[in-house]
Amino acid sequence: MTERGYTATKQQLQNRLSRIEGQVRGIKGMVEEDRYCIDVLTQIAAVRSALDRVALGLLDGHTRHCLAGGHGGPTDPDAQADELMAAIGRIVS
C-alpha cells in the first residue's frame, strides 16, 4: 500500500468532510424550505471555502511528502512542477 502524505490524519480529513457533508444537507433543506436566496448562497460559499481548505491541506501534504520527500511523486523537477500546477489548476477552476 502507498503511504499517503496527508498533513492531517485520515480521521481528521474524514471529520472535516463529514462536517461539509452536513453543511450540504443543510443547504438542501434550505432549498426545500424555500429559504431566502442570499442565505442559501452564503451557505454555498461556506461549503466551497471548507472544501478549498481541505484541498489545500491535501496539496500541501502532497507537495511536502510526495514531491519534496520523494515518496511516490515524479522525481524530475519539471515533472514535479507540471504535476503541482495541474493540481492547482484543478483546485482553482
Image (spheres, rainbow, N blue to C red):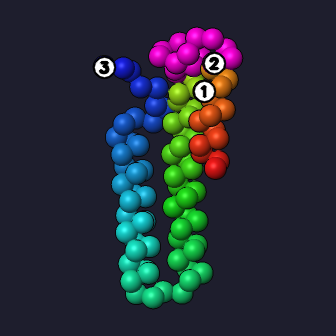
**Residue beneath the point at 43% across and 58% down:** 20
**Residue beneath the point at 44% across and 81% down:** 31
Q: Are marks 1 and 2 in contact (CB under 8 Å)?
A: yes
**Residue beneath the point at 57% across and 50% down:** 52
Residue 30 placement (x, y as % from top left): 43, 80
**Does residue 53 sit above or below 73 in this rendering?**
below
Residue found farthest to the left? 1
Return the residue nearer the eye: 11 or 47.
47
* Residue position for label 3: 1
Q: Is residue 69 visible?
A: no
Crowd tier of the residue under label 2, counting other residues whose Cα lies within 10 Å: few below 14, some 14–19, many 20 or above: few
The number of numbered discs placed on residues in the rendered structure image is 3
The residue type indicated by label 1 comes to Glu
Q: Are marks 3 and 2 in contact (CB under 8 Å)?
A: no
In which quarter of the view is residue 45 placed? bottom right
Q: Is disc 2 placed on a helix, strand or loop? A: helix
**Residue beneath the point at 63% across and 38% down:** 88
Is residue 22 inside the magenta stretch?
A: no
Q: Which mark is residue 83?
A: 1
Q: Main secondary structure of the magenta part?
A: loop
Q: Which residues are magenta?
A: 65-79
Return the residue nearer the eye: 67 or 85.
85
Q: CA distance from mark 1 to mark 2?
A: 6 Å
* Residue position for label 2: 79
Residue 21 placement (x, y as % from top left): 38, 59
Q: Which mark is residue 65?
A: none
The residue type indicated by label 2 comes to Ala
Sequence order check: which comes first, mark 1 or mark 3?
Answer: 3
The residue type indicated by label 3 comes to Met
